[in-house]
Amino acid sequence: MQKVLSVRIEAEDLDFIKSESKEEKTDKAKMLREIVKKGRLQMAIEQYKAGKISIGKAAEKSGLTISEMTDKLAELGIKNNITKEQYLQGMKNIEKIW
């Protein structure tokens, strides 16, 4: 569900949005949504790399599934920061489910 938000931005940022939307042959609103989407992903990746959030939280923040986030991190060459103990606990949890 989309909602409306009025926001003030710097003139240079608006110029960037206008320029990119013209280049991509799309409207400014769609371009801004794409920029926000990419920003969410970038922030999630940075926080994950810094060890501030888990892969699940990074996926949630970015709007991706855990599998998609794992693939994206692998594409970027970012190593998984899960510990051996966390991995083993995860395996135990899977065994309980199955």
Image (tube, rainbow, N blue to C red):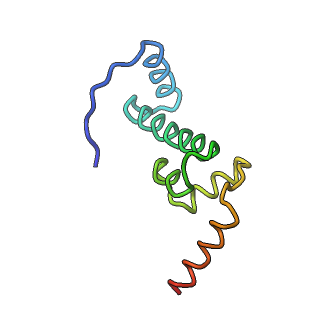
Q: In percent of the image, x 26 and y 40: which residue is there? A: 3
Q: Nearer the viewer, residue 68 or 82?
A: 82
Q: In percent of the image, x 66 and y 67: which residue is there? A: 85
Image side of residue 7 versus residue 64, left or right: left
Image height of 92 relative to 65, above or below = below
Image height of 76 relative to 98, above or below = above
Image height of 75 relative to 23, above or below = below
Q: In percent of the image, x 42 and y 15: which residue is there? A: 10
Image height of 90 relative to 46, above or below = below
- Percent of width and height locating residue 19: 50, 21
Residue furthest top as drawn: 11
Indicate the quadrant where residue 54 lies.
bottom right
Count of marks overlaid on the render: 0
Indicate the quadrant where residue 71 lies.
bottom right
Residue furthest bottom as drawn: 98
Image side of residue 78 versus residue 18, left or right: right
- Percent of width and height locating residue 83: 68, 61
Image side of residue 11 versus residue 96, left or right: left
